[in-house]
Amino acid sequence: IENDSLELFSSLENDNKQARTFKIIVIGDSNVGKTCLTYRFCGGSFLKNPEATIGVDFRERTVQLDGERIKLQIWDTAGQERFRKSMVEHYYRSVHAVLFVYDMTSLLSFESIPEWISECSRHSVGPLVPQVLVGNKCDLRESCQVPTSAAQSLADSHNIPLFETSAKDPSEKEHIDAIFLTLAYRLKSNKTLRLKQPSESSLREMRDQQEQDATSCRC
Ligand SMILES: Nc1nc2c(ncn2[C@@H]2O[C@H](COP(=O)(O)OP(=O)(O)OP(=O)(O)O)[C@@H](O)[C@H]2O)c(=O)[nH]1
Ligand SMILES: [Mg+2]
């Protein structure tokens, strides 16, 4: 009886324990599908007519990994320079993982990846921060401009895993889950990570900035 009640107690304790939260930023050129990918992961469906992201959109999903609840706080960032420049510092502050995205039908978006990687390092995102490279829009096979071999060698040279997927194709839904879960597993087992949460005041400051950007440069 004693054993049973101990087990019950520890499982109750587990349920009550707050889920650990990890901040994942999604980075890449405008129009590559960052909003659609994050929407697919958090909302389940394909977002048909997304607008260009201004500043950042927050999405969230809690997953259960080996009996632990993990909350993934996903920062869907803006690809357009004018909608992101005032926010860059906020993107990288206390980030736990990074997802780089390019569009498989746009060579230019792929050629930007090294710049996104170096922006990351300039903001002191070190090698302990899990990263993945994602080629999106694999459903548009005929218009593909980025050979898998080229993407793979870029990924290898940075020691980052590569995934090719589609936010649009419903049969890729589980694959998108797996991409985010790859990061979540690495975060869960990385005991050395500091789990600093963004403070309320810095979030407020960021939202004010976002409103300013939205009203001043919709041209
Ligand atoms: N065919 C296809 N189209 C996609 C896919 N993902 C996104 N799109 C389309 O690509 C366009 C851009 O998608 P977004 O998700 O808004 O791109 P973004 O990277 O968030 O762009 P910014 O917010 O400006 O940085 C939209 O017209 C989407 O419908 C995909 O997997 N396949
Ligand atoms: Mg967007």
Image (spheres, rainbow, N blue to C red):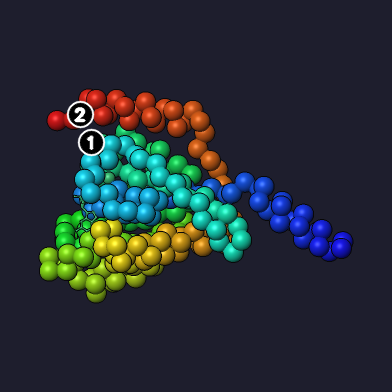
Tags 1 and 2 in contact by the CB under 8 Å rule? yes
Number of marks drawn:
2
Q: Which residue is mark 1?
A: 82
Q: Which residue is mark 2?
A: 217
**Quarter of the view holding residue 81:** top left
Q: Amino acid at mark 1?
A: Arg
Determine the secondary structure under disc 2: loop
- Residue furthest to the bottom in view is 149
The correct choice, above or below, for 214 with respect to 16 in the image is above
Quick check: 65 left or right of 148?
Answer: right
Q: Is residue 27 visible?
A: no
Quick check: 48 left or right of 73?
Answer: left
Q: Within the displayed image, which quadrant is ligand 2 positioned in?
A: top left
Residue 122: percent from left, percent from top: 37, 48
Q: Amino acid at mark 2?
A: Cys
Q: Residue at x 44, y 28 (%)?
A: 204
| Camera-nearest residue between 100 and 4 | 4
- Image quadrant in which the N terminus is located: bottom right
Depth check, mark 1 against mark 2: the one in front is 2
Pointer 2 local density, CA inside 10 Å: few below 14, some 14–19, many at least 20: few
Quick check: 153 left or right of 206?
Answer: left
